Amino acid sequence: MIAEVTASRPCAPLVFGPNAIVCVCNATYCDTLNPLSLPPFGTFVKYVSSRAGERLERSEGEFRTTPSGSGLLYTYNPFVQYQHIKGFGGSHTDAAAINIMRLSPAAQDHLIRSYFSEEGIEYNLLRLPMACSDFSTHAYTYGDKCLDDYELKCFSLAQEDTELRIPLLHRFMAFSKRPLSLIASPWTAPAWLRTSNQVMGKGRLKGEPGNIYHKTWARYFVRFLDEYTRYNITFWAVTAQNEPSSSVYIPMKNFPTTEFTPEEQRDFIIKDLGPALASSSHKNVLLIIHDDQRINLPKWANVVIGNSSAAKYVSGIGIHWYLDSVTLPGLTLDATYLLYPDFFLLYTESCNGFRIWEPKVDLGSWDRGVRYSRSILTNLNSFVVGWIDWNLALDMEGGPNFVENHVDSPIIVNSLRDEFYKQPMFYHLAHFSKFIPEGSIRVALTCNCAVTSCQLHSAGFLRPDGIAVVVVLNDCFWDVEFSIADDKVGYIEDVARANSIQTYLWERCP
C-alpha cells in the first residue's frame, strides 16, 4: 500500500507550563497529517507522541529476522480474533457547535479537517444530544410549544439544530472520506410528559410504560429521526436515554435528565420505543441501552436484554467512563460480554475535568491525554468496540454550559484570537481513530512480561485492508525496551520512551 502524499505540516507549539504543550491553529495555519502510506514488506511505520512535545511524528524501521532477547516481547497473532471495531469519535453538542461557529470560516475549516479529513484524525463516530444537554445555553426540547401534544403536531427542531448543528454536520460529512455513523441521545423530555412538569432538572415520565406519556415519548424519537432525514441526515443508532441513573451520581439540581430504572427501561422498550422504531421508516436504526456508568453492569444488561422481549429490539450497550476508577473492567465489561456476546459494548461519553476538585480546562495537560489512551486500551481489551469523546470543542472556560458543569475538551477555542488549541487528548485519540478504521478486528497480542513496576499498555488489531496495527502506551517515567514478533515478517525492536504513545503499522503480505 504505497500512496503519493503531500508534505504534512508540523505542530505550531504553545507552552503553558513544564511539558504542557498545545498545537495552535488559526485561519492561516494548522498542523496536518498525510494519508496513511506504508513502505514495502519487511518494514514498518511508527507514529509517536510524547510529553516532550512530539505529536504523531512519523518514522520508518525494518523488521529483524531474530530477536536480540532484551526487553519485553509481545507476540502478534492475527489468528486469534476478538471483537470488530466500530470506531472512534466525539460529540456534536450545542456548545461544540457554538464554539466552532465563533471562529472565522477559514479557522472553522481547519478545525473540521482536523477531526474528519484524511489530513486529520478521521473520526467516524459522532454523538448528538436529542435537543438540549447540559452543554447548551438553556434547557429546551422539541415539544415545548404546546401542552399535552400527544400527536406531536407542534414538534419542531430548535434553532440550535437548523442554524448550527445541521449545517456543521453537512460540512463534517463533506470533509470526511470515511462514512460517519451518528448516534442520538435524549437528555430530557418535554415538561408536560414529566413528573416534575419542568424541562430542567430531574424527573421521570408520568405513569408507567405503555401509557400515553411513554408512547408519546417513543413517537418523539421517530419524529426526531424524521426531521433530520428532511435534511438528508440519517442515524446509525439511538440510545434509550442519556444517564438514566444520573440522579444517583449527579448532585446538580438543574441537570437535565429523565430517570429510568433498568426495569422501567426494559418495559419502555418492550411496550413503546421498540415497537415505535420497528414500525417506522427508521427500523434499521440500532437501539442502544444503558448509556451510563459501567458500575451498573452486568445488572442493567441482565434486566433489559436478559428479557427476550426487550432483547429483540436492542443491538448494544452504551457506557460512560466517569466511575471507571471505582469499577473493574473484568467484573463489568468482560462479564457483560461473556453473558451477551451478541450485543456490542460502546463507550459513548468520556471527558476530563469533571471532578469538582480539578481544573475544568487544563491546557496542554499530557496526563489528561494519558487518561484517554489508557481508558481506550483497557476497554478495547475488554471487548468494547469503540470510544466516543464528549464535546468536540469548548471555550477557554470549558463551556458554554447552562448548569455550570464545565469540563475539558481535546480542542479548546479561543475566539478572541480566532484560534484553537489541539490538546494532548486530541493526539492520544488520534493514535486510535486515524489508524484503526471501522471493520478492524482486535487480535491477540500476548506478552512474556513478568510483573514489573512499569507494564506497557498495548493492544493489537488487523485492519480490513490486511495491515497490522499495534498501539503501545508507556505512562511511566523511564524508557522501556520491547519487541513485537510477527511470525510472517519478523521482529520490531524498539524503545517506548518515557511518557509516550506509539502506533505501529506494517504489511503482513509481500
Image (spheres, grey):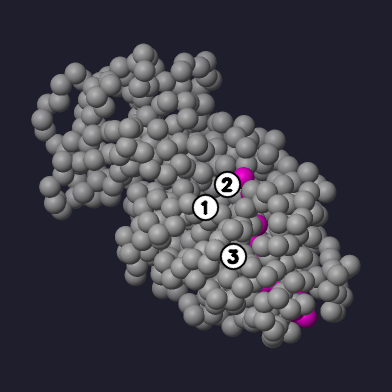
The residue where tag 2 is placed is 125
The residue where tag 1 is placed is 388
Residue 6 is situated, as x and y percent measured from the top left of the image, at 53, 20
Considering only vertical position in the picture, is 136 above or below 42?
below
Q: Amino acid at mark 2?
A: Leu
Residue 97 counted in the magenta span:
no
The Cα–Cα distance between marks 1 and 3, rounded to whole angstroms, is 29 Å
The local crowd at label 2, few if under 14, some if 14 to 19, many if 20 or more residues have their Cα within 10 Å, is many
**Range of magenta residues:** 181-193
The residue where tag 3 is placed is 309
Q: Looking at this view, name the residue that lies furthest to the right.
A: 153
Look at the numbered disc 2 and give the secondary structure of its residue.
Answer: strand
Residue at image point 52% right, 52% down? 388
Look at the numbered disc 3 and give the secondary structure of its residue.
Answer: helix
Q: Amino acid at mark 1?
A: Ile
Look at the numbered disc 1 and give the secondary structure of its residue.
Answer: strand
Asked if the residues shown at circle 1 and circle 2 are in contact, with their CB atoms under 8 angstroms apart, the answer is yes
Q: Amino acid at mark 3?
A: Ser
